[in-house]
Amino acid sequence: MSDLQGSVDVAGTVGQDGVVHVVRNRWSSTRGFVLAAAGSAVGVGNLWKFPYITWENNGGAFVLMYLLCVPLIGLPIMVAELMLGRRAQTNAVSTMESVGASVVGGRNWRFVGWLGVAGSATILSYIIVIAGWAVASFFQCVSWSINGYTPQPPDAFPQFMANTGLQILLSFLFMAATVLIVIRGISSGIESANRWLMPALFGFILIMVLYMLTLDGFGEAMTFLFAPRFGELSDQAILEAMGQSFFSLSLGMAIMITYGSYLRPEQSIPRAATVIVGMDTLVAILACVILYPIIFTFPEIKSSISGSTTGMLFITLPPLFYTKLSGGSLFGPLFYLLVLFAALSSSISLLEAVVALLIDRFKYTRLKATLVSSFVLFIGTILVAFSLDPSNILAQVQVFGTSETGFLHNLNEIFFRGKTGVMGIADHLVANWFLPITGLCTTIFVGWVLDKKILIEELGFAEGSMYLLGFRIIMRFVAPLAILYVLYSVIAGTADFT
Ligand code: PFF
């Protein structure tokens, strides 16, 4: 059944009793759902952030930390979020409200949903700008492939960032693509887009990995990535690994609750979540397998990597394809197409979390919900674009004013680590506050407040089984304590997850 029917997200069917029942839009298959959720999870966080923080944390041992955090904390929280969504069959805010209605705290739990949706909206506003850089790198590479490479002046990237009109145009192109998919609904839009985006993405990754095998630095890169050297592990590494696993798996963002709400009762959540988490982790590791051999083959680029996350992906890499790597005119555009596909499947999910809220709670049609929310969120994107120009006032703003001393200055330090500019502040707010607080509340809700019966019904774990016991121990103790440690470090100023 087309999701476009009347542009609404529910369809009426006449039951045996002759009454018209409202049926929620759904994933047409578990495979489609898994690809869509993995599409949300696999994004610039995997291709841009993970290789960077793994590099900064000296590889091996950090990767191991990450591989511990993912099944121990990330996977159970993903299961919990999908479960809540499926139980309530509605957007994140209404989910927390309705599942919470009969337990301690009641409908007030909805604030967790609001925080998640606010996080999604904020992330979307700036992730669209980063995706715009990938659009630019893609076109740049295509043009070099066709017309030949022209060396760039050293200030090319700063100039590009300061070109606000261009930033807005690129972001707009990307937002338009996101809107065109979300507007078509769950199965005909999000699911069918991911059905070809994800296989294409994996295909590209495979081609790139095979290509990297031919580089001299491949062996050294693999040693760096996989041989744990615990002596080089900093105290912060475990925290960073945890923060990254949250962001990478799209947790604490209302996304998995929303995606779970389109699941059918017979679809197994633990099984699906395991595949989603596995795919996400695989892509994060493979992103390093693609990028590190380049670094180890051309050690002179090492210095340009440290210092900025953007450096590696958008400044250092594009010229390398044309000056150092053979076959670069093919692999350059291909690599950025890969980044674009990954970003698109994530941005779809971020927009859907907001759209679902407008449809379910405010009774908007999908068309209206998508257009209204993308319009409002794009205003945020425009502000972010302005803030990339260092001379613009938006690049310097601080939430509590720019005074260098006093109470307001201290508030800036405590809540935003002194970050300036719209993008820096938004990123800080979400990664350090929204994500952990939403995650903490979700684990407390599922571990301590929710009736165990619901876990048994939704997850198919038998009473007394090891799975149920393990899941509850993680929800009650392991995950909340780990997230509390994250929050403590944020408050104490010993960690920063941006
Ligand atoms: N998980 C995506 C990534 O790793 O790039 C980004 C993301 C998407 C974060 C959706 C949060 C989110 F809700």
Image (spheres, helix red, strand yellow):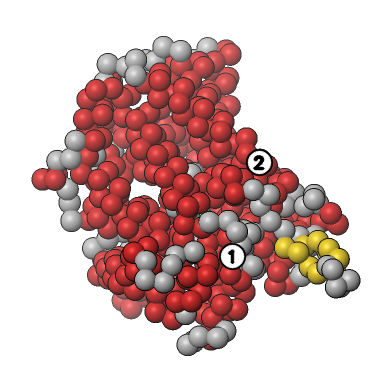
Classify 7 as above or below 63.
Answer: below
The residue lying at 24 percent from left, 39 percent from top is: 59
Q: Any atom of ligand 1 within 8 Å of the CB at mark 1? A: no
**Which residue in the protein does label 2 denote?**
193
The residue lying at 34 percent from left, 19 percent from top is: 213
Q: Give the farthest residue toward the left.
A: 231
Tell me where residue 282 sits by quadrant: top left
Q: Which of 270 and 58 is in front in this view?
A: 270
Q: Nearer the viewer, residue 259 or 331?
A: 259
Classify 355 as above or below 161.
Answer: below
**Which residue in the protein does label 1 denote?**
86
The mark nearer the N terminus, 1 or 2, is: 1
What type is the residue that disc 1 sits on?
Answer: Arg
Q: Nearer the viewer, residue 98 or 364?
A: 98
Q: How crowded is mark 2: few (under 14 residues within 10 Å), some or many (20 or more)?
A: many
1 or 2: mark nearer the eye:
1
Q: In this view, does 102 lie to the left or right of 483?
A: right
Res 380 visible = no
Name the spot of residue 327 as percent of width and height, x first: 46, 13
Tell me where residue 461 sits by quadrant: bottom left
Secondary structure of the residue carrying tag 1 is helix
Q: Is residue 6 left or right of residue 193?
A: right
Name the spot of residue 370 as percent of width and height, x first: 72, 56
Name the spot of residue 182 as percent of width and height, x first: 69, 50
